Amino acid sequence: MRRTLFTIIAVVATIMAATAQSPFAGWWRGQLAMLPIVFHIEETAPGNLSGNLYSPAQTAEPIPLLPLTTVRAHTDTLTVEVAGIGLRYTGTISGTPRKIDGTLTQGGNKFSIALLPATEDDAKVYRPQTPQPPFLYNSDDITFRNGTLTLAGTLTYPWSGTPAGAVVLVSGSGAHNRDEEIMGHKPFAVIADFLTHCGWAVLRYARGCGGSDAGSPHDTTLDFATDALAALRYLRGLDMLRHRPIGILGHSEGGAIAMIDAATHPAEVDFIISLAGPALKGSDIMVRQNEMIAELSGTPVTPAHRDSLRQAFTLLADTTISTQQLEPRLMSLLSDIVTDPDHRLASIQQTSTPWYRAFMAYDPAPYLKEIRCPMLALNGLWDVQVDAEPNLNAIHQAVPHAKVIAYPALNHLFQESASRRQSFQYGSISQTISPTVLNDIADFLLTIPAPTR
């Protein structure tokens, strides 16, 4: 009898051991500086682990950022790797409730990170302002031409079919879709929805995605400005917009594009709205941007580093210097700022593109003095990408009739944030754009007269 009992206990213990789940299986959430990260680890078979890395500040839904290429567990120690980005995390599990204390390394940098138990909800963030169907207005997918390029976009307009006018939305620099999506936020979808409810037609588009041609890798801001004109001319050809004002709303680089088009084609652009548009030279913008971000990150730029940065951006702006000549000079110049040679080379290669170098050389002053149409220029005082005060002052001086507004406690995306330090952590903020900004845009549009042409 005793032997039978021991046999039953041994069988049960064997079954339990075989079916016991790894203590590392499940959802885990940590904090990398101000950026939340989430690991999801699955045990597909006893002792066989796999998983994904999530970055909830960058996507509104729990979409894996990258798969974990290595997941190893040895007693109370976990090691995961993401080969594509050179990331490795090693930690030890302990306590009740469970907690993993460990170190994340990437690119020579080390961070102490504690992982706490989480759920799938921790892998997503919420964007309460993102418009959801059904929409109480018309929304059409359209295409228009800019020379040899076909550009696709979304045109929204009131059900009445008689909009008060039309606005072309032009996004900032970098890869964006027509909603200017960034870290799960869709600023242009929010703006289009709001203005369409106010009775305006709104066209948003983007190069290189959603059915649009990408153009040439040598294209610069001046080339992108022709896209906005082509969009405006498309709208001008619609019967519902005859004798209606049509203008451009641009964010960041898009604000520069709005200024360029208003200055060079005054008969076609009825008004412009600049959301954090640069009004200083591109090289000056970038020096100040690096200073502000470094200061908020706790590592202020020294006078020597500031001088090196200014020299670097001046070199980048000099289009008479070839890329081959540029690289060794920048490698030497930036050696005290970016000490790792591989990182320094990667940074130089990213900033040596035709677009970047053209933006460094860009001077908005000649365009600003030619603007005659109604203009609204907005900036947040916590903007660390386009410093509000000097840029708005430049607009005020060059375009005296422009309405200029500086918003306390708003960042580059015009989000409200708890502190200036947190203001450039766009993904950690649930708000997409301040309602005050939306209302100010709508109020400005009410002042736009019908065109006389």
Image (cartoon, grey):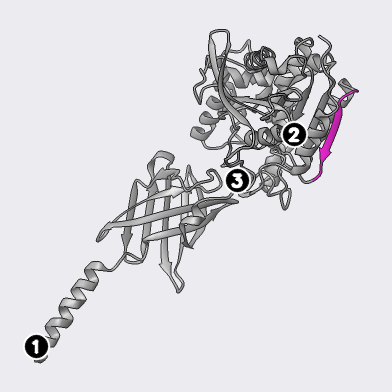
Q: Chief secondary structure of the magenta span?
A: strand
According to the picture, the residue beneath numbered tag 2 turns out to be: 198
Of residue 89 and residue 441, the one placed in the foreground of this image is 441
For the C terminus, which image quadrant? top right
Left or right of 24, for residue 179: right
Image coords of residue 147 (percent x, y) = 57, 7
Question: Which residue is depicted at the point 68% across and 35% down?
Answer: 191
Question: Circle 1 sits on which residue?
Answer: 3
Pointer 3 residue: 427
Q: CA distance from mark 3 to mark 1?
A: 62 Å
Q: Kindly identify the residue that appears in the image at 60 percent across and 32 percent down.
A: 180
Q: Quadrant location of residue 235?
A: top right
Image quarter of residue 173: top right
The CA span between labels 1 and 2 is: 83 Å
Queried whether the magenta region covers residue 32, the answer comes back as no
Which one is in front in this view, the residue at disc 2 or the one at disc 3? Answer: 2
Q: Is residue 283 visible?
A: no
Cα gap from disc 2 to disc 3, whole angstroms: 28 Å
Looking at the image, is mark 1 or mark 2 nearer the viewer?
Answer: 2
Asked if labels 3 and 2 touch by Cβ distance under 8 angstroms, the answer is no
Label 3: few (<14), some or many (≥20) within 10 Å?
Answer: many
Image position of 33 with respect to 321: above or below: below
Q: What's drawn in magenta, residue-wise? A: 401-408
Mark 1 / mark 2, whichever is N-terminal: 1
Helix, strand or loop at label 1? It is helix
- What amino acid type should be assigned to the residue bearing mark 1? Arg
Identified by mark 2, the residue type is Cys
Q: Badges 1 and 2: C-beta atoms under 8 Å apart?
A: no
The one of 14 and 346 positioned closer to us in this rendering: 14
* Above or below 255: residue 88: below
